[in-house]
Amino acid sequence: MKMLISAGIVLAVFANCATAAINVTIQESGTNLVIASSGTLNSGVCTSIATGFSSAFNGIDPSVSNLAFGAVNSVQDQCVGTTITPTTGFGSGGSLAATTNTGVSYYFLPGIGFWGPSGWNSGTAMTASMSFANASLAGEGIAPGTYVYTFTNGATTDTLTINAIAPAPPVPTPTLSEWGVIIMIALMALVSGRRYRRHRKA
């Protein structure tokens, strides 16, 4: 019986760890900057959840770590009583409004707090994305890397992790000298093939 209870506790803890925390990726796609969110936030980091707020902005402000998913005027509920650390930004760029957005509406600003979609709780998927036309990591002063923000309320904690993914390096174009080597190898293969066929005929 003790073994079964212990196994159950381990499974419960593992399941909780697997579903907790919000994960955000920032990466370039062509000439656009794309930001996507997934995961959940443990509502235990909130003393209470205040309802009836309206989103006034959608986009980012890397200088203060602001993430605002969802359409402007979306209804949001505030997580009251949580402390979010650190309050430092994940880049040097200023406020930038999103060109497109999908998914739930939530507002994250470490120095102020967190507002989730209307009626949110620990099981609410914070799945959302937004894109910015003609924008880049460098343009927003975002260095590739991982930025972790911790929500704390007493002994209860959870995290929001931002992963800024470096753009793929450009595919190298062969220089003139490299093209010359390629052509020479191709000609050598052609000549060798002809000599081999002549030798077979002889």
Image: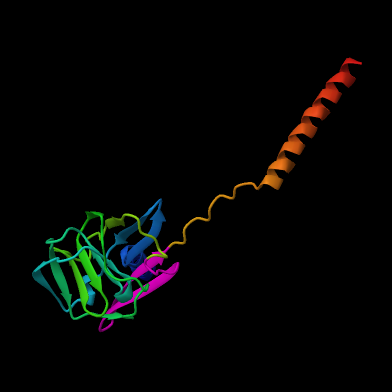
Instruction: Answer whether residue 170 is visible to the viewer in this image.
Output: yes
Please report the residue visible at 65 percent of the width from the left and 48 percent of the height from the top: 175
Please report the residue visible at 36 percent of the width from the left and 67 percent of the height from the top: 140
**Main SS, magenta residues:** strand
Give the residue furthest to the left. 52
- Where are the magenta residues, as a range? 140-164
Count of numbered circles on the image: 0
**In the image shown, does 113 or 122 lie closer to the viewer?**
113
Return the x and y of residue 45 as percentages of the image width and height.
23, 76
Return the x and y of residue 104 as percentages of the image width and height.
21, 58
In this rendering, is residue 131 above or below 61? above
Specify whether residue 157 is painted magenta. yes
Instruction: Answer whether residue 10 is visible to the viewer in this image.
Output: no
Return the x and y of residue 12 as percentages of the image width and height.
32, 66
**In the image shown, does 157 or 64 lie closer to the viewer?**
64
Quarter of the rendering occupied by the C terminus: top right
Q: Horizontal placement of 58 versus 197: left or right?
A: left
Please report the residue visible at 15 percent of the width from the left and 61 percent of the height from the top: 72
